[in-house]
Amino acid sequence: MELNYLAFVLPAFFFFCGLEYYLSLKKDNKVYHFSETISNLNVGIFERTCDLFVTALLHFYFVWLYNNYAVFNIKATVLTWILLFLATDLLWYWYHRLGHRVNLLWSAHVVHHQSDDFNYTVSARITIFQAFFRAIFWSFIPILGFPPQMITIILLLHGAYPFFTHTQLVGKLGLLEKVLVTPSHHRVHHSSNEKYLDKNFGDMLIIWDKIFGTFIEEDEKEETKYGITDPLNSYSFLWQHFHFLLEIGVSFKRAKGFKARWRTLFGAPEEIDPGIRKELEQKLLVAPSQKTLSPQLRQFTVVNTLFTLGFVFFFLLFGYYQTPYQLIVGGIFVLVSVIYTGAILEQRRWIFHIEFARVTLFSGYLTLIYPHFYLVSLVACTITLIVFFYNSANRSYKRLLSIDR
Ligand SMILES: [Zn+2]
Ligand SMILES: [Zn+2]
């Protein structure tokens, strides 16, 4: 049986998050906040799900580049492994630095920086769009002639390492601070304190920041503020992903002449008028009804998130055995689920509509896995009944969750 063992990243991830949470409680250092944590997980859940499709796609892309455009024929030796590691890390440095300085790239990377928290769950806050931008930078590696098998292994290492740099519980690490990107270096990177902006872009080696002049040491006496300079104050999954792209769109429409339009796409984020965000927020975002979540709603959110995580674990584990229809319906179910969780955190009044979509997709997925007559009939009857009593079901559902308004 060919299982997708990358699924086991999920339990490993939660083991370390649990450990960090436990130690933070012991130290009386509150580094986890409920809605922020759920929101970070939400972004990561969808990224991991898409990764099932994207990893294979990128592998074929690297193989195609290697077969058709490789300049050298590089063999795996100790020296070439070291060279590959250095090349990958250097490319990452520039990918990451440009990700902060070029609007189109920032529109994807901004999601990683939106959390006001800084803990292991922030490492999961990555959009799938970043994978495509990264692939452009990493295209140089197969073109240089490094075999795709070597690239896959080094990219796995590159994917795992940054997890460990997203924590406030590990202090400075002595000599390692000189060479490696440490939690201290990465705390600086996630800070919006004026002097820390656009610093410490490295992924595994901090030497690139030192060479290219973007390194700054963490000042332990200064209180660090995490997140973006203008906080988002929204847990909406879609808004988190698309707000900056929309800001670019509005700015592009208003720009006059080729140069101004070019700057909108490829200039730096501070060149976008911050007033555009406010305009868009007023137009597209309705303020949440209540600021705090009731204990019941918190429990409900936890149960839902655990359910989605459980689904994603098995969806990934048996990924190679699923038909394209199952993959599509399952993938959309996960997308709708994370939008749903964001809507619960914001206590949106349209929550029932999305819950209905979620139930329909999940039932549809089950019938694709097990297309037995009785199951299909049961699903069809249930959906028909909900449709028939839609309005009263909507009212009861919202009353149950105490978000009726
Ligand atoms: Zn960054
Ligand atoms: Zn980070």
Image (cartoon, grey):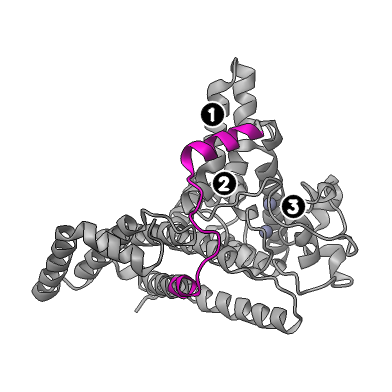
Q: Which residue is mark 3?
A: 201
Rounded to the nearest whole Å, what is the CA distance between mark 1 and mark 3? 29 Å
- The magenta span reads 274-300
Answer yes or no: is residue 54 visible.
Answer: yes
Q: Which amino acid is tagged 3? A: Phe
Depth check, mark 1 against mark 2: the one in front is 1
Asked if marks 1 and 3 touch (Cβ < 8 Å), the reply is: no
The quarter of the picture where residue 373 lies is: bottom left
The correct choice, above or below, for 222 with respect to 211 in the image is: below
Asked if marks 1 and 2 touch (Cβ < 8 Å), the reply is: no
Left or right side of 255 for 62: left
Disc 3 Cβ-to-ligand 1 distance below 8 Å? yes
**Label 3: few (<14), some (14–19) or many (≥20) C-alpha neighbours in 10 Å:** many
User: Could you say whether the residue bearing mark 2 is in a helix, strand or loop?
Assistant: helix
User: Could you say whether the residue bearing mark 3 is in a helix, strand or loop?
Assistant: loop
User: Could you say whether the residue bearing mark 1 is in a helix, strand or loop?
Assistant: helix
Instruction: Point out residue 46 in the picture as x, y percentages from the top left corner.
Output: 46, 60
Which residue is at a point 21% across and 67% down the rendered structure image? 368
The correct choice, above or below, for 87 with respect to 255 in the image is: below
Q: Which residue is mark 1?
A: 250
Disc sitting over residue 108 in the figure: 2
Rounded to the nearest whole Å, what is the CA distance between mark 1 and mark 2? 17 Å
Q: Which amino acid is tagged 1? A: Val
Which residue is at a point 10% across and 75% down the rendered structure image? 374
